């Protein structure tokens, strides 16, 4: 007779209350690393990797109750236009730096908030000014997050003309309006926090991001990070199995069960280094 799958314990959590988008958690990024790591990196020659641009549009029609990102729902057209001017100015500052100057974009991501909150005229003006800094006509992927209630046929046509290859619904984060506008006004790069992860942290970051899809391949991590996942995370995998969240774990694959996948963001904390568990994520 087949053994019954252990029932997953009930843990109180709200949808979207804990969402892992990176590792280590953003709360350990800090001001010191901006001067020590981020700015020197921007002032060195380009790395041999594709260049991508993320653009944040922090406006929404209304606040969704499950969303914990900072978004603005009361900004008028003038304030939105001012923000778009700041966004272009920021990109122009980056565009003069050695790590970025003269490089075409490999991918572009319009995130938010709700990029489709912008009017067609705002979008077209924004794209024209941004593309003047760095062309993206050869970009492999251009993503645009939409909220269905803000879309019209005309706006969708404009989005298509921008070269968008992928529409998405998404949420991101944003610092305060005043801090951002003040920094751009002074001609400064508005970086408030940065972090240079260690080899092990990079390994964990990739592990948790891959595991969000439900499974990982130990051989991949062995080759890239020289780590035996099943040994390194023996305790974590055992705890997932005991709670009914592990589907399988062998030399080929480590996979979550359906229950595990449904609450994956909360479970990923088990793989964090001890100093990153139990702390604020954002
Ligand atoms: S970012 Fe998305 S989920 Fe958050 S309030 Fe705006 S539309 Fe809602």
Image (cartoon, helix red, strand yellow):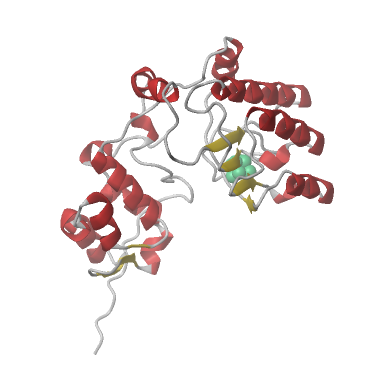
Q: Residue shown at 28%/41% (left/top)?
A: 201
Kindly indicate the quadrant of the structure image that contains residue 49: top left
Q: Nearer the viewer, residue 79 or 262?
A: 79
Placement of the C terminus among the 4 image quadrants: top left
> Is residue 32 placed above or below 200 in the rendered structure?
above
246 lies above or below 186 = below
Residue ID at (62%, 33%): 58
Location of the N terminus (image quadrant) = bottom left
Q: Is residue 74 left or right of residue 260?
A: right
Can the viewer see residue 250?
Answer: yes
Left or right: 140 as drawn, with respect to 44: right
Camera-nearest residue between 23 and 71: 23
Residue 33: quarter of image = top left
Residue 204 appears at what percent x and percent y?
29, 47
- Tell me the quarter of the picture where residue 45 sits: top left
Residue 115 picture location, percent across and down = 67, 39
Q: Residue drawn at (62%, 46%), measured in percent from left and top?
A: 142
* Residue 221 in the image, given as x and y percentages of width and height: 27, 55
Q: Position of residue 85 (x, y in %)?
A: 69, 22
The outermost residue toward the top is: 186
The residue lying at 35 percent from left, 29 percent from top is 195
Let me know if residue 64 appears in the view: no
Q: Compared with residue 80, is residue 9 higher up or lower down, i.e. above or below?
A: below
96 sits left or right of 76 in the view = left
The number of numbered discs placed on residues in the rendered structure image is: 0
- Of residues 186 and 71, the one nearer the viewer is 186
230 is higher (above) or lower (below) than 196: below
Residue at the bottom extreme? 1
Where does ligand 1 appear, by image quarter? top right
């Amino acid at each position: 007779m087949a053994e019954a799958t252990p029932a997953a314990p009930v843990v109180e959590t709200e949808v979207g209350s804990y969402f892992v988008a990176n590792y280590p958690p953003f709360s350990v990024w800090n001001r010191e690393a901006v001067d020590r790591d981020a700015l020197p990196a921007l002032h060195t020659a380009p790395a041999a990797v594709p260049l991508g641009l993320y653009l944040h549009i922090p406006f929404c029609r209304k606040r969704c109750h499950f969303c914990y990102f900072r978004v603005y729902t009361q900004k008028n057209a003038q304030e939105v236009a001012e923000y778009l001017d700041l966004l272009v100015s920021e990109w122009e500052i980056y565009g003069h730096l050695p790590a970025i100057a003269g490089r075409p974009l490999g991918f572009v991501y319009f995130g938010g908030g709700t990029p489709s909150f912008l009017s067609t005229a705002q979008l077209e003006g924004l794209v024209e000014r941004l593309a003047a800094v760095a062309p993206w006509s050869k970009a492999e992927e251009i993503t645009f997050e939409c909220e269905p209630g803000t879309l019209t046929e005309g706006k969708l046509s404009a989005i298509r003309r921008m070269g968008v290859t992928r529409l998405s619904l998404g949420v991101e984060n944003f610092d305060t309006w005043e801090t951002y506008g003040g920094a751009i006004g002074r001609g400064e790069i508005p970086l408030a926090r940065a972090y240079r992860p260690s080899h092990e942290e990079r390994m964990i970051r990739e592990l948790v991001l891959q595991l969000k899809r439900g499974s990982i391949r130990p051989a991949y991590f062995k080759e890239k990070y020289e780590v035996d996942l099943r040994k390194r995370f023996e305790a974590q995998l055992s705890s997932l199995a005991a709670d009914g969240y592990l589907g399988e774990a062998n030399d080929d694959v480590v996979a979550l069960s359906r229950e595990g996948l449904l609450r994956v963001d909360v479970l990923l904390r088990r793989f964090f280094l001890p100093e990153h568990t139990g702390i604020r994520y954002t």
